[in-house]
Amino acid sequence: MARVLVVDDDAVIRELLVVNLEMEGHEPVTAQDGAEALEAVAACPPDLLLLDVMMPAVSGWQVAEELKADPATAAIPIVLLTARAMEVDVRKGASLGVDRYVTKPFDPIDLMDVCTELLDARGAQEGL
């Protein structure tokens, strides 16, 4: 069972992701904005982060940049979930080191496949 931090300011999307993650046997934890996400990661680093980009105060961009710059959290896979589908945004995500860029609306089944792939890869790297 993997601990997955779901960060989105939209409660409906958070709940959708929680339900899907639970159905896959994972332990979802939620945050409604970037500041809560950083606090949650500091308290108990997740195995994977599903991160919205456009949020009040601390954006997903800022969260990803901070986590990827810190050696203690840089290995946590990050999937950006966003309505921002412009190529410049995809490139920005890549430059920050995020692992996947998924645009909204998304297919929950496809997203769970992405989660499984990233968690399996992380487990293989850690020898799990």
Image: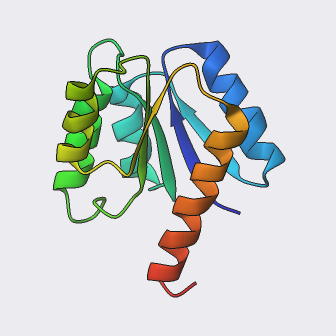
Q: Residue at x 42, y 56 (%)?
A: 77
Residue 44 vs residue 1, the one in the foreground: 1
Q: Specify the farthest residue to the front.
A: 87
Tell me where residue 123 sits by quadrant: bottom right
Q: Is 1 left or right of 55, judged from the image as shown? A: right
Give the tally of numbered discs: 0
The structure's colour scheme is rainbow
Q: Residue at x 41, y 22 (%)?
A: 33
Residue 107 vs residue 9, the one in the foreground: 107
Tell me the quadrant of the picture where the N terminus can be found.
bottom right
Q: Is 42 left or right of 26, judged from the image as shown? A: left
Q: Is residue 128 above or below residue 51?
A: below
Query: Residue 26: horizontal and vertical position, in percent?
Result: 71, 53
Q: Is 58 left or right of 84, judged from the image as shown? A: left
Q: Residue at x 17, y 45 (%)?
A: 95
Residue 114 vs residue 16, the one in the foreground: 114
Tell me the quadrant of the picture where the C terminus can be found.
bottom right
Query: Residue 87: horizontal and vertical position, in percent?
Result: 26, 27
Q: Is residue 79 above or below residue 53?
A: below
Q: Residue at x 43, y 17 (%)?
A: 83
Q: Is residue 3 above or below residue 1?
A: above
Q: Is residue 57 above or below residue 31?
A: above
Tell me where residue 59 sits by quadrant: top left
Q: Specify the farthest residue to the bottom.
A: 127
Query: Residue 5: horizontal and vertical position, in percent?
Result: 53, 43
